[in-house]
Image (cartoon, rainbow, N blue to C red):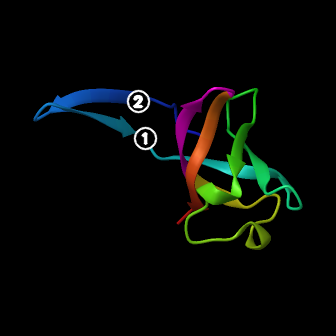
Amino acid sequence: MGELFYQSSEVVFGTIVTKTKIMTGTIKKIVGDRGFGFIAREGEAKDLFFHSKDLNGVTLAELHEGDVVSFEVTQSEKGPNAVNVQRAQ
């Protein structure tokens, strides 16, 4: 669990294509009334923020602390965020 994050870009027909690696982690905390939560990643000291709009196939109410999820990481103005968050298969 908690694979190393990498992101690479390449140019395909004049368009920059960004590739991200799917990672797994554990829901550490959910703040349901504010619509966000945090994911703990193995080997990482800092938890990863996610917003309810970035969930895929699951709602915030269906997730619980300790659930294993898969996700992608993107960079925002405030740091890395988890997107495309879903229950791990």
Amino acid type for the residue under numbered disc 2: Gln
Q: Identify the residue shown where x is 63% and y is 71%.
A: 58
Q: Which residue is mark 1?
A: 21
Q: Mark 2 packing: few (<14 Cα in 10 Å), some, or many (20+)?
A: few
Q: In which image quadrant can residue 11 be found?
A: top left
Residue 70 is left or right of residue 25, and the answer is left
**From mark 1 to mark 2, how far is it between C-alphas?**
7 Å
Tell whether label 2 touches label 1 (CB within 8 Å). Answer: yes
User: In front here: 65 or 36?
Assistant: 36
Q: Position of residue 6 (x, y in %)?
A: 44, 29
Q: Identify the residue shown where x is 78% and y is 50%.
A: 37
Amino acid type for the residue under numbered disc 1: Lys
Q: Is residue 17 magenta?
A: no
Q: Position of residue 23 (x, y in %)?
A: 53, 45
Q: In which image quadrant can residue 19 be found?
A: top left
Q: Position of residue 89 (x, y in %)?
A: 52, 66
- The magenta segment is 71-78
Q: Mark 1 packing: few (<14 Cα in 10 Å), some, or many (20+)?
A: some
Q: Identify the residue shown where x is 70% and y is 51%.
A: 51
Q: Is residue 72 magenta?
A: yes
